[in-house]
Amino acid sequence: MPSHHTPAPARAIAGRRLAWFFALVPILLALFVIAFVPEGERETSPLDTLPVGADSTLAVELEEQLPDDEGQVAIVLWTAESGELDAAAQDELTQQAVSLLSQSGGGASEGAPDGAAAGGDQGTGGAGGPQGGPPGGGEGQQSPLVVAEDGTAAFVAVPVSSTSATDNIDRVEELRDQLREDAPDGVEVQVTGPAGIQADIGQVFDGADIRLLAATAAVVAILLIITYRSPVLWLVPLTVVGIADRLAAIVSTNVLEVVGVAWDESTVGILSVLVFGAGTDYALLLISRYRDELKTTESRYEAMAHALSRTVEAVLSSATTVVLGLLTLLLSAIPTTRGLGLACAVGVVIAATFALVVLPAALVLFGRWVFWPRVPHVGDPVLVDSRGVWHRVGSAVSRRPRTFVAVTVAALAVMALGTTTITTGLDPADQFLERPEAIAAAERLGESFPAGTSDPIQVLTRDDADQVLTAVEGVGGVDSARVTSSGDGISRIDAVPDAAPGSDAAQAVVLDVRGAVVDFDDTHVGGGDAEALDAEEYAASDRQLILPLILLLVLGALLLLLRSIVAPLLLVATVVATYAASMGASWWLFQTVFGFEAMDTGVPLLAFLFLVALGVDYNIFLVTRAREEAREHGTRTGMLRALTATGGVITSAGILLAAVFAVLGVLPLVVLAQLGAIIFVGVLLDTLVVRTVLVPALALTLGEKFWWPRKVGPPDVDAGTTPSPAPSYVSSPGR
């Protein structure tokens, strides 16, 4: 194609005179930013992951205003390796407990946890312990140590003041090291409680960025080598996308810092996976088209300019749709979900920019040799004229399109049946793929003390504390309750339920406590189970608001791109079907293979966003090429030619994207493993079934009506929509 038919921006980016500028200058600027600009920073807050306006969130806001708020509490649990803790061991543990509280700034009477009622008399076996009254509930020396009635375990709660998640990890690890060194013979010591659990979660992300980046880059490199079968070519897109990924991490976190939107440790990890996945997808599409153009054009500069001009619409449409979809997360009630949406939107913009500006310029600086050993030459058959696997797939679909529609829709419907049995909401013990110390200790604590000792219900109030306490104590299922802190007109009451944290019974107690204090004007109920209840409620609200909006945005983007009605509606229906099928199939895998009893409350929304927004990429890649081919060959032949030309690149892109999201499983958090698994299943379904079979079959069944009300093909090409048994849709090599 002559260069004067190519848009000026494409000619400039791929031009002989300016290609070096568009390749080197953005890379040098990016490397400067990477070298000298740190990622954004912010102090974490307990409110970051809580829904705005929820009752448990309001409780945390009140707790933050307490003058003696010392941060989170770590529960130190000592257990006898065999038998009971003897008097000598209890005396030694009491001294350690007093020392720990002294070091943390707490007094002996403050030994009860964030919620566990405080200890008993020294050496009494807990007569005034969690099931009794206030500390030292009788005569004798007051002790912060709470000893179980069965004598096998004892605990003390120690405030852990920290300025950040990293600081909390360090302090908890120091505490664990100190305790293990000082533990009496025959006594095992563990640390749990809110501070311990947060530290263990934080350790999951300690070095996670490097592990995720290394794993993601390795997966991308391997798949690019397999795709291109070249020892050189893969280095160019991997380098460009890798630089874009690091730049995206720095720019996005600094944007979040400037605008004051919260983010957490998982944000940069998911961002990296998305940038690598989307950026490499765009690169695969561009390079595939460039290789084809080199087979019909002598000048590599003209070939790249033409390839870029034919690719830019699909990539920009895809990226814009993904960005708009990600920005809908700004409507979420969860601050960190908002941060994830904004960060990923920034990342996709950077990925698309590098794929459309830096990559084509960088590629054109090299000669054709960069494709060695499969160097394209003028006269070689182009993809659309090939007789490979996608030609055979298209031929099979064209013979019986209605049958393929019926079979694939039925298969997707069967897989989607699993969605009817999905349960959401992970117990604290189920949040990790590998059980950390804090979870094991919490379970052991529940064996010797009331089940809710490690995670009590917290009632924060500005009302009369005595009246609120009386109301809480009267709730069935509350083992004990007491005022643990007060000041500036705010009081905190910690109530220990007799049900294990995360259980239905524990959440029922929370609801009963909320019912008991509903008549008080400024009283709010928090704690782990209360937060889980609110997370479930607000996650459902987010889905009701955001999911339809994502669909409308995707539909709107397709309407504008294709300027038709039928095709966009069908394409949106296919991505929704893919989502439902992947959720159902993944839920079956979770239950039967991985042993997950529930799905995290945030996973359905994020999975929908990524599958729909990214799934529409492949719709756009296929349908824009089909429209291009249909202008000359008609809808039926045009779709089959498009499938032949794009089947390989879409499959490669889909497998790569699925594998990249599967990399999230390198972190031992169930929520990321579930998200990665659902997207892995969904992208493979989308790539191997929906985009390569269902969409072509729908187009072949409808013919020119697929583009209604627009007329795309020549008027005589699609006359009579019944396909011939053995289609011939091969054109001359020169096109």
Image (cartoon, rainbow, N blue to C red):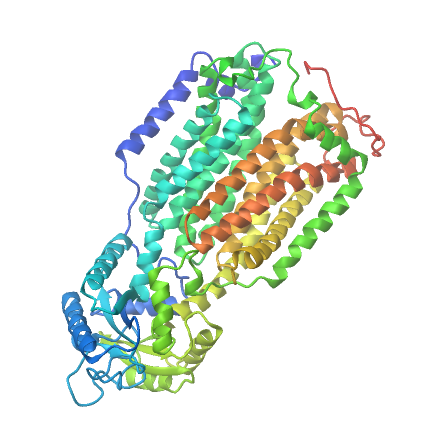
Q: Could you say which quadrant of the image residue 509 lies in?
A: bottom left
Q: Where's residue 327, x and y in %?
A: 47, 46
Taking the spot 37% from the left edge, 25% from the top edge, the residue there is 26
Residue 328 in the image: state x and y as whole percent.
49, 49
In screen coordinates, is 653 left or right of 258? right
* Quarter-of-image position of residue 246: top left
- Where's residue 233, x and y in %? 48, 22
Q: Nearer the viewer, residue 666 or 713?
A: 666
* Nearer to me, 243 or 537: 243
Q: What residue is rendered at 23% in x and 76% in y?
A: 486
Identify the residue at image location x=57%, y=54%.
Answer: 589
Residue 258: where, in percent of width, then height?
31, 45
Of residues 470 and 149, the one nearer the viewer is: 149
| Viewer-proximal residue among 256 and 124 | 124
Question: In which quadrant will I find the C terminus?
Answer: top right
Residue 527 seen in the current view: no
Seen as rendered, the residue at the extreme bottom is: 139
Tell me, yes or no, if residue 175 can be seen here.
yes
- Left or right, 158 with reference to 647: left
Tally the marks.
0
Q: Quadrant of the N terminus?
A: top right
In the displayed orientation, state which residue is furthest to the top: 298
377 to 681, vertically: above or below: above
- Give the residue drawn at x 51%, y 60%: 596
